[in-house]
Image (spheres, rainbow, N blue to C red):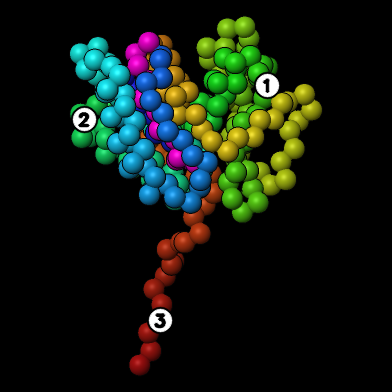
Amino acid sequence: MLLAIDTSAGTAVAAVAADGAVLARRATADTRRHAEIIGPFLQEVLAEAEAVSRPDADPLTGVVTGIGPGPFTGLRVGIAAARAVAIARGVPLLPVPSHDAVALELTEGGIAAGRFCVVTDARRREVAVTEYAAALPTPTVVVPARLALRIGFAPDEGVALYEVTEIPAAALAHVAAARLAAGASFPEPQPLYLRAPDVTMPTAPKRVTS
């Protein structure tokens, strides 16, 4: 069983069995209460998943964390929660770019094909954009072409645009499962902020006069 957590947009948590079945999930598009919501969501999803599965058949084998792109505050809540559960349960932490979950869901659902973009709100009147290349009718792999932070984004002609307010945690787990099955590597568990921090360290100490 994989537990997936994403807080790059709203807050989403899901438990997915080894066969891909979704055992439990919780999600909200609220972007202001990640810290308040993540704890109850984790407790409810784990309890529900363990109630409907046999521990010997579906033990927790990994914790998937969405690494963005997304705003600083939201991302660090989800990644920190995923790290904590992985350490507590003694299982691997599996980082996955959050947009990959949306891309997989779009291609497997037959909605997107060829080149398309996944777009999420980056605040400050900007959006985070990942461009993908996908081939149907066997959409098992989606390849990110480029990642950018754009203002007033308009897609290139012929490129479909899909803007979402929530990242599907179950699809995030499916991306991780596909990577594991293919023996593919995972990125470092570093958040994709895209934007430079507002606060910077001073370059030189201030002069002090008496």
Residue at x-position 24% and y-position 19%: 59
Q: Which of 29 and 87 is in front in this view?
A: 29
Residue 14 belongs to the span the image colors magenta: yes
Q: Mark 1 points at which residue?
A: 115
Q: Which amino acid does label 2 sit on?
A: Arg
Q: Residue 144 carries which label?
A: none
The answer to whether residue 76 is visible is: no
Judge whether 39 appears above or below 87 on screen.
Answer: below
Quarter holding residue 147: top right
Quarter holding residue 11: top left
Which badge, 1 or 2, is on the more N-terminal residue?
2
Residue 2 belongs to the span the image colors magenta: no
Q: Which of marks 1 and 2 is in front?
A: 2
- Magenta range is 7-19
Q: Mark 3 points at which residue?
A: 207
The picture places residue 210, in percent across and down from the top left corner, at 35, 93
In three-dimensional space, the C-alpha distance between marks 3 and 2, rounded to whole angstroms, equals 51 Å
Q: Name the residue under label 2.
A: 89
In three-dimensional space, the C-alpha distance between marks 1 and 2, rounded to whole angstroms, equals 39 Å
**Mark 1 closeness class: few <14, some 14–19, many ≥20 residues within 10 Å:** some
